[in-house]
Image: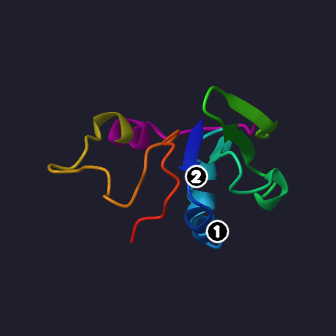
């Protein structure tokens, strides 16, 4: 299962304009979900091959279930994902808020 989390509308729209990125998500899982901060988009703005969850302050609400597809993840890809570790020094970008963050201001 793949979850792509979006907390800003501009980030979501950029992602939706990139069909190759979405195709890569679909190759990695039997389900692909967009998890959206409530209020940044409507479920019908997300392509139908992906499910939509809306994140509120207290819950995740299913707006549209993700279609299930048969999935075969090659073993070498599974091992590469299992071994993956964050890059040294990796941290959240200063302009990227956390899901559920109540500070709604855009940062430069």
Q: Residue at x 65, y 27 (%)?
A: 59
Residue 58: percent from the left, percent from the top? 62, 26
Residue 85: percent from the left, percent from the top? 25, 40
Tell me if residue 2 comes above or below residue 25 in the rendering.
above
Determine the residue located farthest toward the top in the rendered image: 58
Tell me if residue 18 comes above or below residue 78 in the rendering.
below
Tell me if residue 90 comes above or below residue 12 in the rendering.
above
Residue 23: percent from the left, percent from the top? 63, 60
Q: Residue at x 25, y 49 (%)?
A: 91
Q: CA distance from mark 1 to mark 2?
A: 16 Å
Residue 34: percent from the left, percent from the top? 65, 47
* Coloration of the structure image: rainbow
Q: Is residue 78 magenta?
A: yes
Front in this rendered view, residue 86 or 41:
41
Front in this rendered view, residue 99 or 16:
99
Looking at the rendered image, the quarter that the C terminus falls into is bottom left
Which label was assigned to residue 25?
Answer: 2
Q: Which residue is mark 1?
A: 13
Q: Is residue 76 magenta?
A: yes
Sequence-wise first label, 1 or 2: 1
Disc 2 is placed on an element classified as helix
**Residue stretch rendered in magenta on the structure:** 68-80
Which circle, 1 or 2, is nearer the viewer? 1
Looking at the rendered image, the quarter that the N terminus falls into is top right
């Amino acid at each position: 299962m793949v979850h792509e989390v979006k907390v800003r509308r501009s980030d979501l729209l950029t992602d939706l304009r990139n069909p190759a990125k979405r195709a890569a998500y679909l190759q990695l899982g039997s389900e692909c979900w967009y998890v959206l901060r409530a209020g940044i988009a409507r479920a019908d703005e997300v392509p139908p091959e992906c499910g939509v969850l809306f994140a509120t302050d207290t819950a995740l609400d299913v707006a549209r279930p993700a279609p299930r597809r048969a999935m075969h993840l090659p073993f070498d890809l599974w091992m590469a994902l299992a071994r993956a570790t964050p890059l040294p020094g990796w941290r959240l970008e200063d302009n990227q808020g956390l899901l559920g963050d109540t500070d709604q201001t855009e940062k430069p």
